[in-house]
Amino acid sequence: MIKNGKLFLPPPRDGTDFKELFNKIAAAGAGRPLGKDGFPAGPWTPELLADAISQIDANRIGVDLRTVQLWFQVNDKGISTANMRWLARVLGCDDPEATSEWQMELSQAQFRLTATRQ
């Protein structure tokens, strides 16, 4: 689907944890702008995603590239509540309803990751 000129994928609601979910959406390029040909520009890289989050007007602080790199790595590190909000906005393609849905999905996925770590 297309929302605001970006590739929109609805939250899968498949019970995966944050790491699994993040790997899927990053590989698919969810929230990335579409190219001139109407196709997604490709998967997210840590640099592209950090830049996209930092360009959100309401996000005065931005996000550290090292933080985003941790999301891409195989580890037990999850995502902070503040960064979850910005990631949801990217994945929701600046649509308030879609952003809200993504924020709920990311929150649940983070909870599942935390539960498996304990």
Image (cartoon, rainbow, N blue to C red):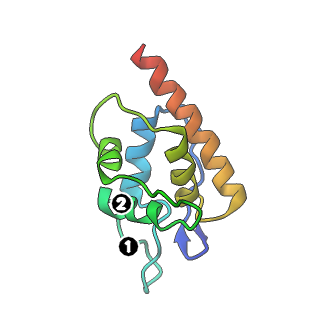
Q: Which residue is mark 1?
A: 41
Task: Specify the amino acid type for callout 1.
Answer: Ala
Q: Position of residue 67 (x, y in %)?
A: 34, 45
Residue at 54% over, 27% down: 111
Along the line of sight, the residue nearer the viewer: 53 or 103? 53
Q: Position of residue 103 (x, y in %)?
A: 61, 45
Quarter holding residue 44: bottom left
Q: Position of residue 46 (x, y in %)?
A: 31, 56
Task: Specify the amino acid type for callout 2.
Answer: Trp
CA–CA distance in space, label 2 to label 1: 9 Å
Secondary-structure class at tag 1: loop
Q: Is residue 79 above or below residue 85?
A: above
The quarter of the image holding the N terminus is: bottom right
**For the view shown, which residue lies furthest in the bottom direction?**
36
Q: Position of residue 49 (x, y in %)?
A: 39, 60
**Circle 2 or circle 1, nearest the eye:** 2
Tags 2 and 1 touching, CB below 8 Å? no
Q: Which residue is mark 2?
A: 44
Residue at 41% over, 61% down: 29
Q: Is residue 107 above or below residue 66?
A: above
Residue at 64% over, 54% down: 99
**For the view shown, which residue lies furthest in the front direction?**
60
Quarter holding residue 57: bottom right
Q: Which mark is residue 63?
A: none
Secondary-structure class at tag 2: loop
Residue at 42% over, 13% down: 118
Instruction: Rate crowding at label 2 as few (under 14), some (14 to 19) or many (20 or more) other CA atoms within 10 Å.
Output: many
Q: Is residue 24 above or below residue 74?
A: below
**For the view shown, which residue lies furthest in the top direction?**
118
Q: Along the horizontal axis of the image, is 98 left or right of 78?
A: right
Q: Along the horizontal axis of the image, is 56 left or right of 95?
A: left
Q: Along the horizontal axis of the image, is 69 left or right of 56?
A: left
